Amino acid sequence: MSSTMESIIRFTEKLTDPSSVKKEEFKSTDIQKSYDINWRSSIGEGVSGKVYQCKSKKTGEQFALKIILDNRSSKKEISLQQRCSESPNVVRIVDVYRGYGIHPSAKLGAKYLYVVLEMMNGGELFDLITKYANLPEDIASMYIRKIALAIKDVHNLGLIHRDIKPENILLKSPIMDISQDPDLKLADFGFACEESSNPAKPDYTPYYAPPEIICKDKRWNHSMTDADRQSYDSKCDIWSLGVVVYILLCGYPPFYPEVNYAEMTNYMYACITHAKYKFHSQKWCHISANAKDFIKCCLQVDPTSRPTIEQILEHPWISETKYFQS
Ligand code: 3AM
Protein backbone atom coordinates (compact mmCIF):
# COMPACT_ATOMS: atom_id res chain seq x y z
CA MET A 1 0.00 0.00 0.00
CA SER A 2 1.20 3.54 -0.69
CA SER A 3 2.64 5.76 2.02
CA THR A 4 0.10 8.53 1.42
CA MET A 5 -2.61 9.17 4.02
CA GLU A 6 -5.16 7.51 1.84
CA SER A 7 -4.04 4.24 0.40
CA ILE A 8 -5.07 3.61 -3.14
CA ILE A 9 -6.20 0.39 -4.64
CA ARG A 10 -5.04 0.12 -8.19
CA PHE A 11 -6.56 -2.32 -10.48
CA THR A 12 -6.97 -2.80 -14.14
CA GLU A 13 -10.17 -3.64 -15.86
CA LYS A 14 -10.66 -4.62 -19.42
CA LEU A 15 -13.47 -2.63 -20.94
CA THR A 16 -15.70 -4.23 -23.55
CA ASP A 17 -13.01 -3.55 -26.10
CA PRO A 18 -10.32 -6.05 -25.07
CA SER A 19 -7.55 -3.87 -26.45
CA SER A 20 -8.42 -1.03 -24.10
CA VAL A 21 -7.17 -1.53 -20.61
CA LYS A 22 -8.02 1.32 -18.26
CA LYS A 23 -6.30 2.00 -14.96
CA GLU A 24 -8.56 3.24 -12.18
CA GLU A 25 -7.88 4.54 -8.74
CA PHE A 26 -10.39 4.05 -5.94
CA LYS A 27 -9.66 5.07 -2.38
CA SER A 28 -9.98 2.32 0.21
CA THR A 29 -10.05 4.50 3.32
CA ASP A 30 -13.25 5.55 5.09
CA ILE A 31 -14.83 8.34 3.04
CA GLN A 32 -16.12 9.86 6.29
CA LYS A 33 -12.56 10.84 7.21
CA SER A 34 -12.59 13.33 4.32
CA TYR A 35 -16.29 14.14 3.87
CA ASP A 36 -19.19 14.94 6.18
CA ILE A 37 -22.18 13.10 4.73
CA ASN A 38 -25.76 14.06 5.43
CA TRP A 39 -27.39 10.63 5.71
CA ARG A 40 -30.65 12.09 7.04
CA SER A 41 -32.09 13.16 3.72
CA SER A 42 -31.08 12.11 0.22
CA ILE A 43 -31.02 14.72 -2.55
CA GLY A 44 -32.26 12.25 -5.11
CA GLU A 45 -32.80 8.66 -6.01
CA GLY A 46 -31.83 6.94 -9.24
CA VAL A 47 -32.23 3.36 -10.45
CA SER A 48 -28.86 2.47 -8.98
CA GLY A 49 -29.46 4.02 -5.55
CA LYS A 50 -29.74 7.17 -3.47
CA VAL A 51 -27.68 10.34 -3.88
CA TYR A 52 -26.67 12.22 -0.72
CA GLN A 53 -25.19 15.62 -0.01
CA CYS A 54 -21.66 15.72 1.39
CA LYS A 55 -19.11 18.36 2.34
CA SER A 56 -15.33 18.28 2.10
CA LYS A 57 -13.85 18.48 5.60
CA LYS A 58 -10.82 20.23 4.14
CA THR A 59 -12.44 22.95 2.01
CA GLY A 60 -16.08 23.01 3.12
CA GLU A 61 -17.16 22.59 -0.52
CA GLN A 62 -20.47 20.79 -1.12
CA PHE A 63 -20.63 17.67 -3.33
CA ALA A 64 -23.15 15.02 -4.30
CA LEU A 65 -22.47 11.44 -3.24
CA LYS A 66 -23.76 8.68 -5.47
CA ILE A 67 -23.60 5.16 -4.06
CA ILE A 68 -23.56 2.18 -6.39
CA LEU A 69 -22.82 -1.50 -5.99
CA ASP A 70 -19.20 -2.41 -6.65
CA ASN A 71 -19.50 -4.46 -9.81
CA ARG A 72 -18.17 -4.52 -13.35
CA SER A 73 -20.86 -2.29 -14.85
CA SER A 74 -20.48 0.35 -12.09
CA LYS A 75 -16.71 0.43 -12.69
CA LYS A 76 -17.31 0.84 -16.38
CA GLU A 77 -19.77 3.71 -15.75
CA ILE A 78 -17.22 5.49 -13.55
CA SER A 79 -14.35 4.88 -15.91
CA LEU A 80 -16.25 6.31 -18.91
CA GLN A 81 -17.47 9.38 -17.00
CA GLN A 82 -13.92 9.97 -15.73
CA ARG A 83 -12.69 9.96 -19.32
CA CYS A 84 -14.88 13.02 -19.86
CA SER A 85 -13.31 14.83 -16.90
CA GLU A 86 -11.79 17.52 -19.14
CA SER A 87 -15.22 18.47 -20.46
CA PRO A 88 -16.88 21.43 -18.73
CA ASN A 89 -20.19 20.02 -20.03
CA VAL A 90 -20.11 16.71 -18.16
CA VAL A 91 -20.70 16.29 -14.38
CA ARG A 92 -17.24 15.84 -12.87
CA ILE A 93 -16.25 12.89 -10.69
CA VAL A 94 -14.16 14.26 -7.83
CA ASP A 95 -13.32 11.10 -5.87
CA VAL A 96 -14.26 7.44 -5.73
CA TYR A 97 -14.13 5.34 -2.55
CA ARG A 98 -14.57 1.59 -2.40
CA GLY A 99 -15.64 -0.41 0.62
CA TYR A 100 -18.35 -2.14 2.63
CA GLY A 101 -21.66 -0.32 3.04
CA ILE A 102 -21.81 2.55 5.52
CA HIS A 103 -25.03 4.16 4.25
CA PRO A 104 -28.48 3.57 5.79
CA SER A 105 -29.74 1.10 3.14
CA ALA A 106 -26.44 -0.82 2.78
CA LYS A 107 -26.65 -4.60 2.58
CA LEU A 108 -24.50 -6.58 4.97
CA GLY A 109 -21.36 -7.93 3.26
CA ALA A 110 -21.94 -6.05 -0.01
CA LYS A 111 -19.24 -3.78 -1.42
CA TYR A 112 -20.06 -0.34 -2.75
CA LEU A 113 -18.49 2.46 -4.72
CA TYR A 114 -18.95 5.91 -3.18
CA VAL A 115 -18.75 8.38 -6.05
CA VAL A 116 -18.20 12.02 -5.07
CA LEU A 117 -19.62 14.23 -7.81
CA GLU A 118 -19.64 17.96 -8.38
CA MET A 119 -22.84 19.31 -6.86
CA MET A 120 -25.58 20.27 -9.32
CA ASN A 121 -27.93 22.36 -7.22
CA GLY A 122 -30.37 23.28 -9.97
CA GLY A 123 -32.00 19.88 -10.39
CA GLU A 124 -32.81 18.17 -13.66
CA LEU A 125 -33.84 19.64 -17.00
CA PHE A 126 -36.88 17.39 -16.52
CA ASP A 127 -38.05 19.61 -13.61
CA LEU A 128 -37.87 22.64 -15.89
CA ILE A 129 -40.07 20.92 -18.48
CA THR A 130 -42.56 20.03 -15.76
CA LYS A 131 -42.56 23.65 -14.57
CA TYR A 132 -42.89 25.36 -17.96
CA ALA A 133 -44.79 22.60 -19.90
CA ASN A 134 -43.07 23.84 -23.06
CA LEU A 135 -40.25 26.32 -23.57
CA PRO A 136 -40.18 29.29 -25.97
CA GLU A 137 -38.28 28.23 -29.09
CA ASP A 138 -35.25 30.50 -28.74
CA ILE A 139 -34.80 29.42 -25.12
CA ALA A 140 -35.18 25.74 -26.08
CA SER A 141 -32.57 26.11 -28.82
CA MET A 142 -30.14 27.72 -26.35
CA TYR A 143 -30.59 24.71 -24.01
CA ILE A 144 -30.24 22.22 -26.84
CA ARG A 145 -27.04 23.90 -28.03
CA LYS A 146 -25.54 23.36 -24.58
CA ILE A 147 -26.64 19.72 -24.53
CA ALA A 148 -25.21 19.24 -28.04
CA LEU A 149 -21.86 20.65 -26.87
CA ALA A 150 -21.82 18.06 -24.08
CA ILE A 151 -22.64 15.25 -26.52
CA LYS A 152 -19.90 16.52 -28.85
CA ASP A 153 -17.32 16.20 -26.05
CA VAL A 154 -18.49 12.63 -25.36
CA HIS A 155 -18.45 11.64 -29.06
CA ASN A 156 -15.04 13.22 -29.61
CA LEU A 157 -13.68 10.84 -26.98
CA GLY A 158 -15.04 7.88 -28.95
CA LEU A 159 -17.86 7.30 -26.47
CA ILE A 160 -21.65 7.05 -26.79
CA HIS A 161 -23.86 8.18 -23.89
CA ARG A 162 -26.90 6.06 -24.91
CA ASP A 163 -29.23 7.65 -22.35
CA ILE A 164 -29.72 11.25 -23.43
CA LYS A 165 -32.90 12.41 -21.67
CA PRO A 166 -33.98 15.41 -19.56
CA GLU A 167 -33.51 13.41 -16.32
CA ASN A 168 -29.79 13.05 -17.13
CA ILE A 169 -29.17 16.72 -17.81
CA LEU A 170 -28.47 18.56 -14.57
CA LEU A 171 -28.33 22.28 -13.86
CA LYS A 172 -25.48 23.72 -11.81
CA SER A 173 -27.74 26.19 -10.00
CA PRO A 174 -31.46 26.95 -9.81
CA ILE A 175 -32.79 28.85 -12.81
CA MET A 176 -33.75 32.41 -11.82
CA ASP A 177 -34.07 33.78 -15.33
CA ILE A 178 -34.97 31.29 -18.04
CA SER A 179 -33.39 33.44 -20.77
CA GLN A 180 -29.93 33.23 -19.19
CA ASP A 181 -27.29 30.96 -20.65
CA PRO A 182 -27.85 27.74 -18.62
CA ASP A 183 -24.98 26.00 -16.84
CA LEU A 184 -26.08 22.47 -17.57
CA LYS A 185 -24.13 19.24 -17.67
CA LEU A 186 -24.57 15.69 -18.81
CA ALA A 187 -24.80 13.07 -16.03
CA ASP A 188 -25.32 9.33 -15.57
CA PHE A 189 -23.02 7.24 -17.74
CA GLY A 190 -24.75 4.00 -16.65
CA PHE A 191 -25.60 3.07 -20.27
CA ALA A 192 -22.52 4.67 -21.88
CA CYS A 193 -20.07 2.64 -23.92
CA GLU A 194 -17.14 2.97 -26.27
CA GLU A 195 -18.25 3.33 -29.87
CA SER A 196 -15.52 0.93 -30.96
CA SER A 197 -16.78 -1.75 -28.58
CA ASN A 198 -19.45 -2.69 -31.13
CA PRO A 199 -22.20 -2.42 -28.52
CA ALA A 200 -24.75 -5.17 -28.73
CA LYS A 201 -26.59 -4.97 -25.40
CA PRO A 202 -29.78 -3.00 -25.81
CA ASP A 203 -29.82 -0.77 -22.71
CA TYR A 204 -32.38 1.96 -23.25
CA THR A 205 -35.07 4.25 -21.89
CA PRO A 206 -38.19 3.53 -24.03
CA TYR A 207 -39.28 7.12 -24.86
CA TYR A 208 -35.82 8.17 -26.07
CA ALA A 209 -34.46 5.00 -27.67
CA PRO A 210 -33.79 4.89 -31.43
CA PRO A 211 -35.04 2.12 -33.76
CA GLU A 212 -31.60 0.51 -34.10
CA ILE A 213 -31.42 -0.08 -30.32
CA ILE A 214 -34.94 -1.31 -29.63
CA CYS A 215 -34.64 -3.60 -32.67
CA LYS A 216 -32.01 -5.51 -30.74
CA ASP A 217 -34.36 -6.20 -27.87
CA LYS A 218 -35.54 -9.79 -28.20
CA ARG A 219 -38.73 -8.97 -26.30
CA TRP A 220 -39.91 -6.80 -29.19
CA ASN A 221 -38.21 -8.31 -32.15
CA HIS A 222 -38.75 -12.05 -32.16
CA SER A 223 -37.83 -12.58 -35.80
CA MET A 224 -34.38 -11.01 -35.70
CA THR A 225 -31.46 -13.38 -35.56
CA ASP A 226 -28.24 -12.45 -33.81
CA ALA A 227 -26.58 -12.06 -37.19
CA ASP A 228 -29.21 -9.48 -38.15
CA ARG A 229 -28.57 -7.38 -35.10
CA GLN A 230 -26.43 -4.71 -36.60
CA SER A 231 -24.35 -2.69 -34.27
CA TYR A 232 -25.15 0.93 -33.56
CA ASP A 233 -23.03 4.01 -33.14
CA SER A 234 -23.03 7.57 -31.85
CA LYS A 235 -26.05 8.40 -34.03
CA CYS A 236 -28.27 6.84 -31.35
CA ASP A 237 -27.58 9.94 -29.20
CA ILE A 238 -28.74 12.15 -32.10
CA TRP A 239 -32.13 10.39 -32.20
CA SER A 240 -32.53 10.88 -28.43
CA LEU A 241 -31.60 14.55 -28.82
CA GLY A 242 -34.41 14.87 -31.38
CA VAL A 243 -36.84 13.39 -28.86
CA VAL A 244 -35.65 15.88 -26.21
CA VAL A 245 -36.18 18.82 -28.61
CA TYR A 246 -39.70 17.62 -29.42
CA ILE A 247 -40.55 17.37 -25.71
CA LEU A 248 -39.03 20.79 -24.88
CA LEU A 249 -41.16 22.44 -27.56
CA CYS A 250 -44.54 20.85 -26.90
CA GLY A 251 -44.35 19.24 -23.44
CA TYR A 252 -45.05 15.63 -24.48
CA PRO A 253 -42.98 12.94 -26.23
CA PRO A 254 -43.19 12.07 -29.96
CA PHE A 255 -43.51 8.33 -29.25
CA TYR A 256 -45.72 7.07 -26.48
CA PRO A 257 -47.77 3.96 -25.67
CA GLU A 258 -51.45 3.96 -26.66
CA VAL A 259 -52.31 3.45 -23.00
CA ASN A 260 -50.79 4.99 -19.93
CA TYR A 261 -47.90 2.54 -19.47
CA ALA A 262 -44.39 3.58 -18.56
CA GLU A 263 -43.11 0.58 -20.52
CA MET A 264 -42.79 -0.02 -24.23
CA THR A 265 -45.78 -1.55 -26.02
CA ASN A 266 -46.12 -3.16 -29.47
CA TYR A 267 -47.76 0.03 -30.75
CA MET A 268 -44.92 2.24 -29.47
CA TYR A 269 -42.34 -0.18 -30.88
CA ALA A 270 -43.99 0.11 -34.31
CA CYS A 271 -44.10 3.94 -34.11
CA ILE A 272 -40.41 4.22 -33.20
CA THR A 273 -39.18 1.73 -35.79
CA HIS A 274 -41.12 3.59 -38.52
CA ALA A 275 -40.43 7.08 -37.09
CA LYS A 276 -44.21 7.57 -37.01
CA TYR A 277 -44.91 10.76 -35.08
CA LYS A 278 -46.92 13.93 -35.68
CA PHE A 279 -46.59 17.66 -35.29
CA HIS A 280 -50.15 18.09 -33.96
CA SER A 281 -51.40 21.39 -35.34
CA GLN A 282 -52.77 22.69 -32.04
CA LYS A 283 -49.32 22.65 -30.37
CA TRP A 284 -47.05 22.94 -33.39
CA CYS A 285 -48.69 25.57 -35.61
CA HIS A 286 -46.63 28.39 -34.06
CA ILE A 287 -43.35 26.50 -34.12
CA SER A 288 -40.83 27.39 -36.81
CA ALA A 289 -40.00 25.32 -39.89
CA ASN A 290 -36.37 25.32 -38.70
CA ALA A 291 -37.31 23.60 -35.42
CA LYS A 292 -39.41 21.00 -37.23
CA ASP A 293 -36.58 20.40 -39.71
CA PHE A 294 -34.16 19.91 -36.81
CA ILE A 295 -36.42 17.24 -35.29
CA LYS A 296 -36.99 15.55 -38.67
CA CYS A 297 -33.21 15.34 -39.25
CA CYS A 298 -32.66 13.68 -35.86
CA LEU A 299 -35.64 11.30 -36.02
CA GLN A 300 -34.63 9.38 -39.13
CA VAL A 301 -34.87 5.60 -38.97
CA ASP A 302 -31.61 5.13 -40.86
CA PRO A 303 -28.84 6.28 -38.49
CA THR A 304 -26.51 7.07 -41.40
CA SER A 305 -29.01 9.72 -42.59
CA ARG A 306 -28.95 11.51 -39.23
CA PRO A 307 -26.54 14.44 -38.83
CA THR A 308 -23.35 14.14 -36.80
CA ILE A 309 -23.14 16.19 -33.61
CA GLU A 310 -20.96 18.74 -35.47
CA GLN A 311 -23.69 19.12 -38.13
CA ILE A 312 -26.28 19.47 -35.35
CA LEU A 313 -24.37 22.48 -33.99
CA GLU A 314 -24.38 24.03 -37.47
CA HIS A 315 -28.13 23.58 -38.00
CA PRO A 316 -29.77 27.04 -38.35
CA TRP A 317 -32.17 26.32 -35.49
CA ILE A 318 -29.11 26.12 -33.21
CA SER A 319 -26.57 28.41 -34.86
CA GLU A 320 -29.02 31.25 -35.51
CA THR A 321 -30.62 31.35 -32.08
CA LYS A 322 -30.89 34.89 -30.78
CA TYR A 323 -29.17 33.81 -27.55
CA PHE A 324 -26.23 32.29 -29.41
CA GLN A 325 -22.94 33.08 -27.72
CA SER A 326 -19.63 31.97 -29.16
O1 3AM B 1 -34.25 11.76 -7.54
P1 3AM B 1 -34.18 13.02 -8.33
O2 3AM B 1 -34.75 12.85 -9.70
O3 3AM B 1 -34.73 14.20 -7.60
O4 3AM B 1 -31.01 14.88 -10.00
C1 3AM B 1 -30.58 13.57 -9.70
C2 3AM B 1 -31.72 12.65 -9.32
O5 3AM B 1 -32.62 13.36 -8.50
C3 3AM B 1 -29.73 13.57 -8.43
O6 3AM B 1 -29.86 12.27 -7.91
C4 3AM B 1 -31.01 11.63 -8.45
C5 3AM B 1 -30.63 10.34 -9.13
O7 3AM B 1 -29.78 10.58 -10.21
N1 3AM B 1 -28.33 13.82 -8.74
C6 3AM B 1 -27.52 13.01 -9.47
N2 3AM B 1 -26.31 13.56 -9.58
C7 3AM B 1 -26.35 14.73 -8.90
C8 3AM B 1 -25.39 15.78 -8.67
N3 3AM B 1 -24.16 15.70 -9.18
C9 3AM B 1 -27.64 14.89 -8.37
N4 3AM B 1 -28.00 15.96 -7.64
C10 3AM B 1 -27.04 16.92 -7.47
N5 3AM B 1 -25.78 16.84 -7.96
Image (cartoon, helix red, strand yellow):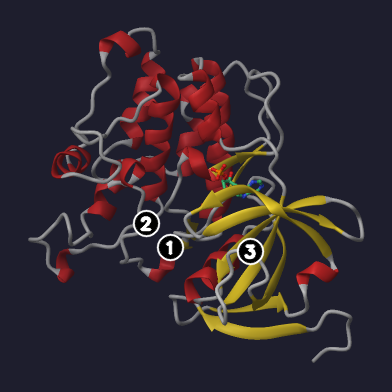
State the residue at coordinates (29%, 9%).
282
The three-letter amino acid code for the residue at tag 2 is Asp
Q: How crowded is mark 1: few (under 14 residues within 10 Å), some or many (20 or more)?
A: some
The three-letter amino acid code for the residue at tag 1 is Glu
Mark yes or no: residue 318 visible.
Answer: no
State the residue at coordinates (54%, 31%).
127
Q: Position of residue 112 (x, y in %)?
A: 60, 73
Q: How crowded is mark 3: few (under 14 residues within 10 Å), some or many (20 or more)?
A: few
Mark earlier in primary sequence (1, 2): 1
**Residue 43 vs residue 104, the one in the foreground:** 104
Q: In this view, does 144 lie above or below 301?
A: above
Whether disc 2's CB lies below 8 Å from ligand 1 is answered no
Q: Mark 1 points at which residue?
A: 195
Compute the Cα span from label 3 to label 1.
37 Å
Whether disc 3's CB lies below 8 Å from ligand 1 is answered no
Q: Is residue 111 above or below residue 146?
A: below
Q: Which of marks 3 and 2 is in front?
A: 3
**Residue 137 numbered tag:** none
Q: Which of marks 3 and 1 is in front?
A: 3
Q: Quadrant of the C terminus?
A: top right
Whether disc 1's CB lies below 8 Å from ligand 1 is answered no
Q: Position of residue 79 (x, y in %)?
A: 59, 68
Q: Is residue 120 above or below residue 326?
A: below
Q: Name the residue under label 2.
A: 233
Compute the Cα span from label 1 to label 2.
6 Å
Q: Residue 252: name its quadrant.
A: top left
Q: Position of residue 132 (x, y in %)?
A: 52, 19
Q: Do the residues labelled 1 and 2 touch (CB within 8 Å)?
A: yes
Q: Position of residue 251 (x, y in %)?
A: 40, 23
Q: In this view, does 261 lie to the left or right of 19?
A: left
State the residue at coordinates (59%, 60%).
81
